[in-house]
């Protein structure tokens, strides 16, 4: 179809995306080399470049005000009102000024008062004095395995600044007292000197320019502003990446001076060996400690405390440390790899030495900083969590029950021998999310026997072999899945890339990173062509079934429904290798596309789709094979 990207155009898009990535990495390497050759001077260079960014922003404001002044002068001297010019300049000026006065939303937080935790506040005051950092405005406590130093103000660029230290209960409980001190001191390294206020201002500049870029993307202003911001963004982003990595080493060094190099290093090691490493009890919802209760438990933190206390250092911990020590510093994260951080602290020790040290008994941070008052603090944090969760608990539990109900239904079909490929996919996803590896392995074994060519099951199989079995054969499974269904390229390549990066195999990881870049470029090229052929609006997923949320892509306007459907089918099936199986067109809604399965499994669709509103359903190929869906799609008109 005329206007759709050709194979050559898609290849050009991929090449452009690759070159952009390579250029970005090379720019970071260039700045790293300059910083190493000119110690102590790189921060000044970044500050000057940030000054150029503010010059761009305020020059834009000045030019717009000048144009507005000239327009007013013309109106006064000539007696004519140029409404269209006033509107254009006014809208643009409003967008610029709005970007300068963006409000920063802050979620409700649990704040630790000095009366709650006098020992912790005394430690924080001591670190403040030694680090020459500004006083901490407040200490926030949550349940996470994390700590952070934040500088806040009411508006992005203006207003009184607050220095907020956020600590996680899981972090304080997992680490020894000295390790916890080192982590807190590390965060104060970010509060002090060049890290703190400059970092906050630099972040404000970045967000301001991004908002301007998005607001002024079209028309003449976009033509002038877009290339300027593109040029500036790519360089400023690379500079801040290098500076951010340097700041991590600086903060580690301060933590070592405040406690000891060994305490700072051992805290890093303990965080890397813990099975709690990916642990993030957002809103207090921790599957291991909260089951399907009718209301949020009032002792959430006590349950969390007990759960963390039951964690053991075992063979999994050893595997985690081996992987962490192998991992190399890369360009995905400004945080250096564990091995490089230990080397900078002059704490390169044998694997066995580290394991012996973390196995030794210790007094944890909760005991050290909360003392006998820890139970009272736990009760207060639990009450805070309870109040926060109560209003949305029914939705949370409803989701859990929905998953549980779906699991029961699928297991019943499985027992009857009627479970199709999508059912095995759903079961595998449930057990993967739940981290029930035994059930996952059993479902995969059976599903792969029945449907050996199912790409989605191959994707989960590849994940299982890499992350559970630690077996490199999972890479071959993922490669085969991507060949069969290019639509899963991003997911499959991301699994492989994550595994190889953790293992420290940078060269092979790069191969999968390029697959992700190529696929993203291809999708963007097709989306761009679709937008030119038929302007699109993005919209959120909508419910079309009690148990399923259907992911809708772009809507197509200014084209008849049938023309839009054929256009979408052409783009998705021929140009990007997606396997299209069903199109849903709602009369008073936008056109939605759902890729339900890789091949025409009509009964799968019948099991999953139940639509109570009238719609037009367009199915590819022979209408007869879609007959089973007619009973479930009420009031629909079917077009073959």
Image (tube, rainbow, N blue to C red):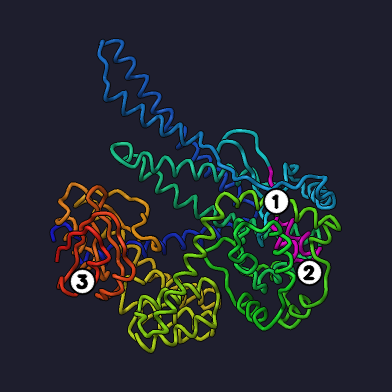
What's the distance in space between the residues labelled 3 and 1, CA to CA? 53 Å
Left of 402 or right of it: where is 170? right
- Tell me the element at label 1: helix
What's the distance in space between the residues labelled 1 and 2, CA to CA? 37 Å
- Residue 180 painted magenta: yes
- Residue 619 painted magenta: no
| Quadrant in which residue 616 is drawn | bottom left
How would you classify the magenta stretch by its main secondary structure? helix
| Quadrant in which residue 266 is drawn | bottom right
Residue furthest to the right in view is 372
Say if residue 308 shows up in the picture.
Answer: yes
Q: Which residues are magenta?
A: 163-191
Q: Nearer the viewer, residue 9 or 49?
A: 9
Left of 312 or right of it: where is 544? left
Q: Which residue is mark 1?
A: 383
Tag in front: 2 or 3: 3
Q: Which residue is mark 3?
A: 626
Say if residue 37 shows up in the picture.
Answer: no
Residue 225 image position (x, y, % from top left):
36, 40
Residue 583 image position (x, y, % from top left):
24, 62
Q: Which residue is mark 2?
A: 262
- Tell me the element at label 3: helix
- Tell me the element at label 2: helix
- Position of residue 145 relative to residue 413, above or below, is above
Q: Which residue does the image show at 77% across and 53% down from the upper left?
A: 377
Residue 226 image position (x, y, % from top left):
36, 44
């Amino acid at each position: 179809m005329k206007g759709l990207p050709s194979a050559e155009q898609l290849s050009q898009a991929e090449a452009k995306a690759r070159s952009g990535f390579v250029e970005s990495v090379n720019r970071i390497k260039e700045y790293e080399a300059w910083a190493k050759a000119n110690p102590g001077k790189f921060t000044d260079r970044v500050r000057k470049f940030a000054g150029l960014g503010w010059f761009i922003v305020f020059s834009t404001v000045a030019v717009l005000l000048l144009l507005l002044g000239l327009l007013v002068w013309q109106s006064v001297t000539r007696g004519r009102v140029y409404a269209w010019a006033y509107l254009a300049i006014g809208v643009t000026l409003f967008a610029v000024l709005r970007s300068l006065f963006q409000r920063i939303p802050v979620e409700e937080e649990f704040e630790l008062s000095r009366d709650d935790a006098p020992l912790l506040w005394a430690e924080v005051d001591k670190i403040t004095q030694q680090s020459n950092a500004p006083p901490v405005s407040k200490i926030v406590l949550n349940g996470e395995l994390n700590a952070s130093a934040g500088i806040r103000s009411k508006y992005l660029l203006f207003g009184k600044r607050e220095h907020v230290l956020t600590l996680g209960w899981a972090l304080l409980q997992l680490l020894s007292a000295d390790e916890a001190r080192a982590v807190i001191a590390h965060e104060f390294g970010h509060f002090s000197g060049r890290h703190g206020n400059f970092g906050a201002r630099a972040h404000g500049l970045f967000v301001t320019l991004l908002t301007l870029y998005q607001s002024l993307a079209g028309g003449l202003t976009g033509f002038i502003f877009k290339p300027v911001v593109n040029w500036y963004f790519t360089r400023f982003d690379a500079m801040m990446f290098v500076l951010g990595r340097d700041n991590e080493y600086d903060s580690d060094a301060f933590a070592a001076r405040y406690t000891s190099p060994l305490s700072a290093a051992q805290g890093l090691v303990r965080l890397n060996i813990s099975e709690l490493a990916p642990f993030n009890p957002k809103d207090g919802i921790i599957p291991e400690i909260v089951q399907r209760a009718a209301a949020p438990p009032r002792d959430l933190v006590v349950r969390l405390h007990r759960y963390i206390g039951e964690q053991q250092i075992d063979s999994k911990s050893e595997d985690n440390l081996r992987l962490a020590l192998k991992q190399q510093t890369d360009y995905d994260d400004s945080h250096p790899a564990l091995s490089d951080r230990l080397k900078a602290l002059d704490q390169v020790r044998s694997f066995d030495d580290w394991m012996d040290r973390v196995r030794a008994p210790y007094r944890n941070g909760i005991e050290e900083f909360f003392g006998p008052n820890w139970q009272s603090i736990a009760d207060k944090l639990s009450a805070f969590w309870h109040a926060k969760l109560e209003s949305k608990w029914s939705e949370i539990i409803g989701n859990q029950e929905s998953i549980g109900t779906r699991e029961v239904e699928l297991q019943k079909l499985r027992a009857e021998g009627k479970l199709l490929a999508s059912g095995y996919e759903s079961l595998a996803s449930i057990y993967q999310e739940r981290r029930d590896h035994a059930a996952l392995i059993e479902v995969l074994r059976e599903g792969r026997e029945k449907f050996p060519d199912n790409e989605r099951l191959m994707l989960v199989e590849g994940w299982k072999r890499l992350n559970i079995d630690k077996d490199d054969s999972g890479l071959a499974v993922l490669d085969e899945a991507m060949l069969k269904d290019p639509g899963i390229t991003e997911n499959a390549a991301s699994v492989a890339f994550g595994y190889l990066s953790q293992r420290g195999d940078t060269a092979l990881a790069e191969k999968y990173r390029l697959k992700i870049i190529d696929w993203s470029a291809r999708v963007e090229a097709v989306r761009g062509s679709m937008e030119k052929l038929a302007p699109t609006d993005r919209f959120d997923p909508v419910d079309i079934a009690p148990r399923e949320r259907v992911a809708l892509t772009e809507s197509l306007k200014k084209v008849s429904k049938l023309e839009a459907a054929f256009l979408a089918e052409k783009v998705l099936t021929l140009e990007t290798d997606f396997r299209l199986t069903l199109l849903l067109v709602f009369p008073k809604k936008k056109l939605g596309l759902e890729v339900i399965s890789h091949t025409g499994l009509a009964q799968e669709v019948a099991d999953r789709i139940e639509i109570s509103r009238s719609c037009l359903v367009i199915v590819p190929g022979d209408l007869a094979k879609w007959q089973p869906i007619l009973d479930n799609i009420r009031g629909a008109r079917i077009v073959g």
